[in-house]
Image (tube, rainbow, N blue to C red):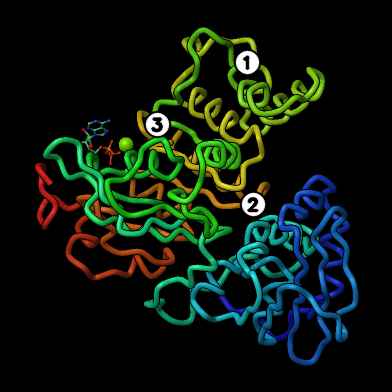
Amino acid sequence: MAIPDEAPVLRIEEALARALDGDAGAVARLEHADTSVAFRAPGQDGAVLLLDRVPTLIPAEDEPAEIEILFTAEQARRFVVGALPLTAAIVSGQVRAEGPVRKYLEVDPILRKLLGEGHAGSEYDGRSDAPEERITEAIDPALLAIETRDLHKSFGSNHILQGLNLAIPEGAISVILGPSGTGKSVCLQHVIGIMKPDAGDVLIRGRALSSMSRAEILGLRRTIGVMFQDGALFSAQNVYENVAFPLRQHTDFAESEIRQIVMEHLESVGLANAGSRMPNELSGGMRKRAGLARALALNPGIVLCDEPDSGLDPVRTALLGDLLVERHAEHGGTMVVVTHNIMLARSIADHISVVWRGKVLEAGMTEQILQSDTPFIEQFLSGAAHGPLTMDA
Ligand SMILES: Nc1ncnc2c1ncn2[C@@H]1O[C@H](COP(=O)(O)OP(=O)(O)O)[C@@H](O)[C@H]1O
Ligand SMILES: [Mg+2]
């Protein structure tokens, strides 16, 4: 959808100033990027955003920034109302950007939400346009949060990962879509370094796991939150203690700080009153949400959700999908959702990797994948019984 010509044109500097005036918690989270970004467009000076301890805006005239983002006039008009998802736009080459852009993309969802809120009352409905062209090129490795390079894994004679090349862009919700038994969970275990590949490597934000010491891999795990397939709550602990667990394990926060963080997260997943319940007293959907709260407790830059929809009915799946999108917009970073549910993928994904028999069959921004005409993807997307995918695939 294009913005009508008569729509009021906000200048970049003005829009960013309003955004920084928004929800203080969200503004503070922008500091995760720890960089400086110049946003520029033809006909205006743009502005430089300093994303460090206290996010600040300075006039851009000749001000050098670590990252430069260069909009066309039309892109600037979408950006200022929070309607330009930059991961998709930069990955597809529509928006020009220079410098260590990945660092900024970590917080792009947060800034986008602030820009959209600062713009309340506009005629514009905030939906983003479909990409102007199909994306066919590989994503620049510098923009990736997670990469697997030619990953192989066998269990006995079972060759599960057969040269898996995943490329997950920073700052987006990425869905890994594939039928059961294709090695999706095995892949996630490699990403967090619980399993070691027979060949190939995993890179997290450019760093190869194979080059890390055990201590470094443990440190890395602190920055990756995992929502396991079955919720994987500790059955002998109540919900509150389950969510507090990573904080007790990885931080030396005082009890009062832990309480505050745990309650915030429980509230954000709609479980504010369920802290004292035991896992076996929860419905399936509540267990998933408790698992999500625990995965988010340490404010990780990367969140992995393994089949968050398994065992949920369609309505609860849709609600959980909305919750994932909301949490991502609030916290930024990269969210990876593993599923075989095409409806869920359609409704939440910015980026999709289709995985089959231990390989990535096709990957790209969602619009591109949903238009795909390869037989497997057509079959999978339409849920048809006839095609290359059979019961024993
Ligand atoms: N630790 C393991 N030991 C032996 N086989 C395993 C192990 N983990 C997974 N597998 C096998 O690998 C295959 C892929 O499993 P998985 O990654 O769980 O599939 P998905 O998550 O895509 O449904 C399955 O056939 C499973 O039995
Ligand atoms: Mg699985």
> SS of the residue at dot 2?
loop
Circle 1 is placed at which residue position? 241
Give the side of residue 381 with respect to residue 229, left or right.
left
Name the image quarter holding residue 183: top left
Q: Position of residue 244 (x, y in %)?
A: 65, 21
- 203 sits left or right of 273 in the view: left
Residue under the image location 65 percent in, 80 percent down? 75
Q: How crowded is mark 3: few (under 14 residues within 10 Å), some or many (20 or more)?
A: some
Mark 3: amino acid? Gln
Ligand 1 location (quadrant): top left
Give the amino acid at mark 1: Glu
**Which label is found at residue 364?**
none
Residue 361 spot, x, y in % from top left = 26, 61
Task: Work out whether 166 lies above or below 184.
Answer: below
**Quadrant occupied by the N terminus:** bottom right
Residue 3 or residue 230, whichever sits in front: 230
Q: Residue 332 carries which label?
A: 2
CB at disc 3 and ligand 2 closer than 8 Å: yes
Q: Quick one: 79 or 196, which is closer to the camera?
A: 196
Element assignment for label 3 = loop
Of labels 1 and 2, earlier in sequence is 1
Instruction: Please give left or right for residue 142 compared with residue 317 in the image.
Output: right
Residue 290 to residue 300: above or below: above
Label 1 beta carbon within 8 A of ligand 2: no
Q: How far apart are marks 1 and 3 (CA)?
A: 19 Å
